Image (cartoon, rainbow, N blue to C red):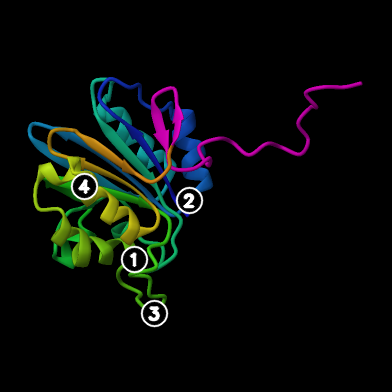
Amino acid sequence: MCIICSSKAGVRQPTFGTIRTMFENNPHGAGYMYARDGKVHIRKGFMDVDSLLDALRREHFTARDPVVYHFRISTQAGVNPQMTHPFPLSNRRAHMKALNVECQCGIAHNGIIHLTADPSNKEYSDTAIFITDYLSEILRGPADLRDPSTLNLIRHLAGSKLAIMDASGYIVPIGEFINERGLLFSNGSYTAPRSPWAAPTKCS
């Protein structure tokens, strides 16, 4: 099902322990995007948690940095670096496969977009197709990310959760997110599963 973790400017970054938990619970590859110097920078295709953590150590992100992280569970197009998230906003499907991208807008998704879901498509995920065939026509400029009617249209079409970032670092969450001290998570898989052997919290 995947998970998105969104840290807007002024909010702490997730700990490496949380990063590791999200990867372990959503193990089909990861990526992240951040805004800097008037661009969205996408880095994705991390197929093991250690390579992701090494990359994040080199980034030296702080609370000043707007960052969106994504951890994938594949539902279409298999397990591969190219279909990890985030994706750039583009009408060209070949752009969806790029692992290192500078762009004006990036998208991460959690869920299944039934409008574009096609189990027979072994090359592109439902998210990649939704971006190229729909979002690229709907989002024409930064103002659209602040327009309630546009965001409502995207929410109805996707029927799931997205985080969209523009080049200024503005992040729009679409759908219901969990707010954990400022960090936004698209579901609860950022927490470690409770062991059945864990000690009871109360005894009588």
The quadrant where residue 62 appears: top left
Q: Residue at x 35, y 52 (%)?
A: 109
Indicate which disc residue 120 carries. Answer: 3
User: Which residue is label 2 attached to?
Assistant: 27
Looking at the rendered structure, the secondary structure element under dot 1 is helix
User: Left or right: where does residue 100 sit relative to residue 200?
Assistant: left
The stretch of residues the image draws in magenta is 178-204
| Residue 10 percent coordinates (x, y) | 27, 20
Per the image, label 4 sits on a secondary structure element best described as strand
Residue 200: in magenta span = yes
Work out whether mark 3 precedes mark 1 in sequence or the reverse, and give the earlier one. 3
Assess whether mark 1 and mark 4 are in contact (beta carbons under 8 angstroms).
no
- Disc number for residue 126: 1
Q: CA distance from mark 1 to mark 2?
A: 18 Å
- 25 drawn magenta: no
Residue sitting farthest toward the right: 204
Question: Quick check: 73 above or below 40?
Answer: below
Say what amino acid the circle numbered 4 marks: Gly
Label 3 and label 1: CA atoms lie apart by 11 Å
Residue drawn at x 43%, y 29% as measured from the top left: 16
Q: Residues within 10 Å of mark 1 (few under 14, many from 20)?
A: many
Helix or strand or loop: what does disc 3 sit on?
loop
Image coordinates of residue 80 in percent, x first then y, are 36, 61
Asked where in the image residue 127 lies, by quadrant, the reply is: bottom left
Residue furthest to the front in view is 149
Measured Cα–Cα span from mark 4 to mark 1: 16 Å
Near mark 4 (Cα within 10 A), the count class, few <14, some 14-19 or many ≥20, is many
The residues bearing labels 2 and 4 have C-alpha atoms spaced at a distance of: 21 Å
- Where 96 falls versus 39 (above or below)? below
- Checking the image for residue 106, the label placed there is 4
